[in-house]
Amino acid sequence: MKLTKLYLFACGCFVYSNLFAQSPKDIEADLLKSFKKIDYWHQQRSKDTTMAWSDSLEKANDIFGRKLKYYTQKYPATIFYPFNSLLKEYLNISSSSGGLFRIYSWDT
């Protein structure tokens, strides 16, 4: 009986956690925060000649790329979201004419 209750509780928690999706604004805010870290380390490159920034810049790029992949896979509707704040920070977004294919790129 206890095992059945535990199983039902675990299933209920799983379903409950999946009911609340993030809004596009929340996704964009998280991506923007991560993208600004890339810019920060990119700016450090011009100030520091010791290459101490190199690992941090690479890590920031990897984190942003993983977040972008996660959000676009988990929330497919993001393919239609304009991400205006990311565009202002010089993230390039190229879309196909049908709008069903996108390429995100940034140059650091």
Image (cartoon, grey):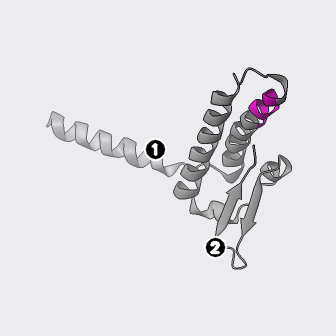
> Which residue is nearer to you in this view: 76 or 63?
63
Residue 13 drawn above or below residue 88: above
Residue 100 drawn above or below residue 10: below
Left or right: residue 78 versus residue 9 is: right
Residue appearing at x 68%, y 33% in the figure: 57
> Which residue is nearer to you in this view: 55 or 27?
55
Spatial CA distance of label 2 from label 1 is 28 Å
Q: Position of residue 34 (x, y in %)?
A: 69, 38
Answer with mark 2 or mark 1, whichever residue precedes in sequence. 1
Q: Which residues are magenta?
A: 39-45
Q: Which mark is residue 17?
A: 1
> Which residue is nearer to you in this view: 101 or 61?
61
Residue appearing at x 54%, y 50% in the figure: 70
Q: Position of residue 58 (x, y in %)?
A: 63, 36
- Mark 1 belongs to which amino acid? Ser
**The C terminus - image quarter:** top right
Q: Main secondary structure of the magenta part?
A: helix
- Furthest toward the left, the residue is 1
Q: Which residue is mark 2?
A: 100
Left or right: residue 36 versus residue 70 is: right
Residue 15 drawn above or below residue 30: below
Q: Quadrant of residue 4?
A: top left
Can I make out residue 90 in this image?
A: yes
- Furthest toward the bottom, the residue is 98
The local crowd at label 2, few if under 14, some if 14 to 19, many if 20 or more residues have their Cα within 10 Å, is few
**The N terminus - image quarter:** top left
